[in-house]
Image: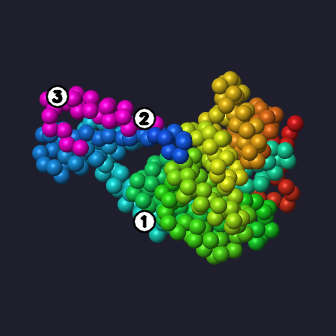
Amino acid sequence: MLLTEINHIEDAAKVARRILDTVSQPLVLSGQEVFVTPSIGIGVFPLDGRDADTLLKNADAAMYHAKDAGRNTYQFYAASMNARALERLGLESKLRKALEHGELLLHYQPQVEVVSGEIVGVEALIRWQNPELGLVSPAEFIPLAEDSGMIVAIGEWVLRAACAQNMAWQDTGCARVRVAVNLSGLQFRRSGLVETVQRILAETGLPPEFLELELTESTIMRNAGETIAALQQFKRMGISLSVDDFGTGYSSLSYLKRFPLDTLKIDASFVRDITDDADDRSITTPIIAMAHGLGLKVIAEGVKTESQLAFLRKHGCDEVQGFLFSKPLPVDTCTALLCATRPFVGKASHG
């Protein structure tokens, strides 16, 4: 957008605020409110460039800075952003080579059944070990992968690696557990996903009942008709489906009942203060009850304390994962845990 009739920099800020206010209003799609969180970057002539290419480049850098600041905001360009933009480009270049060079790896976090205390599943979580940068946080490279489109290739690698590893565990006599793999919104909307999953299961030999696909609320809500059709194909294959980080978006259980889901995962932000915060308790307790009423299994994420576990057990939560039981584990450590001669019984089994 080009603003030609402004006299002061603050006028551009006023326009940006009006755009944010307008675009941030809820949209009603299929009877459900959906919220958009825009990010705006502003470049000012002639301070930030004397030609169109430079102004656009600097406004783009400011936009990415706004995204990094949490979205739903605007940022004016500052010269220091060029350094951040260059850093981002360098990181993107390294990430493009990471798959080819074998720098990506998976850790697995156990999911524990509350009643028995046994491991019944693991969630596959990606890590990036770069020879120059060391261990790069997923919080830093996953948004970059999504913005650049690399998340599709990375997501396919994760799916194949997780299925192959689970099959390897089963072949060596380890516990037969499901592996949960997160699908990004971009990956889910990509044509041919169902065929890709079918091909990977065939290549690895993993029975589909040992695979669970996790999607966020926002991904599920984006296009209800297409989403339902895709999920039904996965269900017919025998794959389990879960909605991840429930409670952080804007959907409701009454809306989610339209989708052929198996599992609802309560976000860790609601579990963190569950024993001290009445609001979190008032949210979590009915979620568990209503999910069960819809025939959904409930998994609570981010469980760190015995008191959190006791509360979740009392209210009928089916499974839990979190540091109380285990952090995400490298393959070798997780293999030793799953292949232990006697069933894993964690703190969840204590009275």
Segment colored magenta: 1-26
Residue underneath mark 1? 97
Residue 16, percent from left and from top: 29, 34
The numbered disc on residue 25 is: 2
- Residue 227 to residue 139: above or below: below
Give me the residue at 81% from left, 59% from top. Answer: 340
Q: Which residue is mark 3?
A: 8
Residue at the extreme bottom: 203
168 relative to 257, above or below: below
Residue type marked 1: Lys
Which image quadrant for residue 281? top right
For the N terminus, the image quarter is top left
Mark 3: which amino acid?
His
Please tell me whether mark 3 or mark 2 is closer to you in this view: 2
- Identify the secondary structure beneath mark 3: loop
The relative height of residue 169 versus residue 261 in the rendered view (above or below) is below
Q: Tell me which label, 1 or 2, sits earlier in the chain.
A: 2
Does the magenta segment cover residue 13?
yes
The residue depicted at 85 percent of the width and 47 percent of the height is 116
Q: Nearer the viewer, residue 228 or 213?
A: 228
Q: Please identify the quadrant where the C terminus is shown.
A: top right
Residue 94 x/y as whole percent: 40, 60
Labels 1 and 3: the sequence-earlier one: 3
